[in-house]
Structures are given as C-alpha cells and as structure tokens.
Amino acid sequence: MRGGIQWLVEQDDWQHSVVFARGVTPEELGLRMGGVRGSVVSPITDAEAWDMVLDLSTADDDVVRVGAHGGWSFAVEYGLGDGAQRLVDISRNGVEVVHLHPSVDHPPALFSYARDGVDVCGFGIGEECWRWGVQPDLLLPELVAAGVLHSDGEYALTEDESYQDRDRRTLAMIETRFGLSLPRDVRESERLLAFVIA
C-alpha cells in the first residue's frame, strides 16, 4: 500500500478533491463539509461513490467519503465539490485543514491551508509564485528548500525538468510539512463512511 500524497500527480484523471483535517473525527469532518447525517447507510467504495453522484437527482448534490489516516481525518469529494468554500468553517475551533483540489476544468491544481477559522495560505500547484491568505509566505522557506522557488519567490524550474516532476516536489513538500498520507488503496478500494452533500 502506497502512502503519502505524491501519487495524486501521477494520475491522468486526478478528479478527486481531498480535504485533510486535524482535530475532528471523520464523521464530524463530513458533517462540517455539509454532509447530511444518515444520507448514506453503509460504507462505500470509490466506484460506488461515483455511481451515486451520477444517480443523484440534481447536479447540485455531491458525495463525500471520509476516513482517518496518519493522525488526520480525510474527506474525498465526488462531483463538483465545494470544500474550498467551506475551509474556514471546517477549521473553526482550533481545527487545521488542508485542501487539495485538482481544478480539472481550470488548472492548476490548488492547495489551501486554514486553521482555527482563518484562511492561512494557498497557491496553485505549478503557480507557487502567486500565493494568498493571511500568511501567504508561510511555506515559502519549504518551497525554496524543495527547489520549487528561489528565495525571491521566482520559479526554480530548470529547462529540462518536467512540470509533473516539479508538481511532485510541491506535493512532497506539502506531504512532509503537514505529515499527510492517503494511501491510494484506501482511496480506491476501502469501504468508507459517506455522506450526500446537498
């Protein structure tokens, strides 16, 4: 079973937004994301979650599967997902939240970090020179150490390096900085508690 989160960049069809939260249970994370308690009776797999999204009555309904790994609760979003819009609320009362969104329709993929009801920092994976939040430079030292950016905030990408390799370095930095792990087998095959988000 492969841990970490770097494998996300290797998927040609990275379609899942993932929210990691430290300080709440998986069930509480699902509820904070707008999940309807009891809306999914038994734990489901990745494929079953996609089937549910396709079968839901309105395009505004999404599904989220939740679990825990490596000291963090996690939620995998299916459908359009709006985890990014809920981060500040999810992080209330001392909770830390990391959100990774593939932004399939409008690249690049996005990273966001919120803590205790505050949008701390974020950036595009592949556009790390443009950062936002109340502490936009919080991870600048780590991005420099990873060889993604120079200390002045400009790109450190060499001409012969692929963008996928650079994106993997960014995900590796996020993985290490926050201690994140979501094994691919868990995401794809494990039956996890799920909620419909309406």
Image: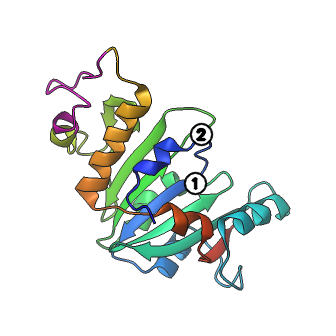
User: Which labelled disc corresponds to residue 55?
Assistant: none
Q: Is residue 130 above or below residue 139?
A: above
Q: Is residue 67 left or right of residue 162?
A: right
Q: Is residue 60 left or right of residue 26?
A: right
Q: Name the residue carrying label 2.
A: 12
Q: Residue furthest top?
A: 159
Give the quadrant of residue 78: bottom right
| x then y, percent, for residue 26 | 48, 78
Q: Which residue shows up at 22% across the image and 32% down it?
A: 147
Q: Residue 152 in magenta? A: yes
| x then y, percent, for residue 184 | 51, 61
Q: Is residue 191 above or below residue 181?
A: below
| x then y, percent, for residue 76 | 55, 62
Which residues make up the magenta segment? Answer: 143-158
Q: Is residue 67 above or below residue 197?
A: below
Q: Residue 177 in magenta? A: no
Q: Name the residue carrying label 1.
A: 82
Is residue 198 visible from the viewing direction of this image? Answer: no
